[in-house]
Image (spheres, grey):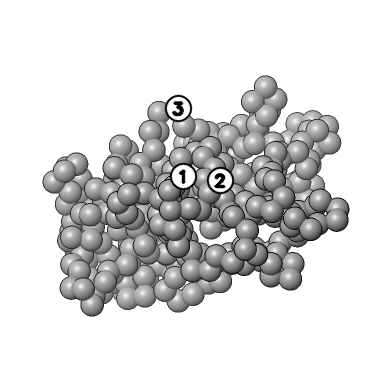
Amino acid sequence: MAESMLREEVEVYSEKYDIHGVVRDYGMVTKLFFTYQGKDIVMGVHRNILKGEKYEDLGRNIIDSYVTNLATHEEGKKLQLHYWYIEEHESDSEMLRIGHGIVTGHNKLSDAMNMHTSAVEAIHIDEEEGELVLTTRNSVYHCPLAYCRFKKQDKYPDIIPGYERLKEKYIDKIEYPSIDPGKVLLVLANFCDYYFHSLYYVPNDSKDGKCLEYSGWSHVGNFQDSYLINTEDYKVDLRYFPHYQNIEFYSEDTDGCPWFIENIGDVVIYAKTSAGTIKLEPGDRKEVAKENAEDENPILPDGDLYPAGIVE
């Protein structure tokens, strides 16, 4: 399928870091492939034809920027699944156990991708770390117990040792951030779909002091997906394009209130806002304000986070 749709393939090279890569143009989808420190990187990219941009230059610049601005020190970083569950699946008259979830730290897959594992060979609980450890033939996945999708796992309770006790202990135990009334907080993480984790806003005139309920959903486009977050009555309306380790806002309505972005993941995420490009290291919370923007805007991947439709 991929070869039949391929329009153009261009080799690219970063002299600065001695990294070879390739750009593959499939028409509606264009991808950049390269390897860095043993990790296979695949990201959607976009070429500005009107400015005469060449794939050779685009690929080189993004590789350079990735190493400079986005690369994570992998030593000691766990391979994790969030929003996970384990199911049984029959294959060739054999019952297999398969893990599902949003992956981070994989050497082949990008963060924030939904995936399923190969056949599970072992499961054990590490309550000191608060995680289930799932072992396959080639990988060991660390699955935070608070991020288990218990409604899904309820269908296969016997797979997990002591499941009912663990469920009682960890269900609804995710630790969520908070913020003062009259301020808006958007929380991002690389272990969430489209990087969106949660939103918090308590209006100053709130009678009960509770955060407004919100909805978040993706809009899948032919060339570029977007993600939309609204509170009730649309008092807060945030919309952005998700790219590889960065997001680009095109709506920032926060009911006239100051707003902040927090990164609770384990990789850097950049946010392109009306105030400029804001760099968020893991654990950072920053107000969307000019004083928090980068002095110089880094070159960042601006293709779709999930370049769909092409199976390599």
Residue that mark 1 sits on: 280
Query: For this view, does 232 lie left or right of residue 256?
Result: right
Report the residue at 67% width, 45% height from top. Answer: 179
Type of amino acid at the residue the image marks with label 2: Glu
Report the residue at 42% width, 74% height from top. Answer: 223
Q: Secondary structure at mark 3?
A: loop
* Res 239 → quadrant: bottom right
Q: Position of residue 7 (x, y in %)?
A: 26, 74
Residue that mark 2 sits on: 262
Residue sitting at the far left: 15
Residue that mark 3 sits on: 76
202 shown above or below 241: above
Query: For this view, does 206 lie left or right of residue 255?
Result: right
CA neighbours of label 3 inside 10 A, class few (<14), some (14 to 19), many (20+): few
Quarter of the image for the C terminus: give it.
bottom left
Query: Which of the marked residues, 2 or 1, is nearer the chain's N terminus?
Result: 2
Q: Is residue 254 visible?
A: yes
Residue sitting at the far right: 208
Type of amino acid at the residue the image marks with label 3: Gly
Q: Secondary structure at mark 2?
A: strand
CA neighbours of label 1 inside 10 A, class few (<14), some (14 to 19), many (20+): many
Query: Which of the marked residues, 1 or 3, is nearer the chain's N terminus?
Result: 3
Q: Secondary structure at mark 1?
A: strand
Distance from disc 3 to disc 2, alpha carbons, whole Å, reads 23 Å
Is label 2 in contact with label 1 (beta carbons under 8 Å)? yes
Distance from disc 2 to disc 1, alpha carbons, whole Å, reads 7 Å
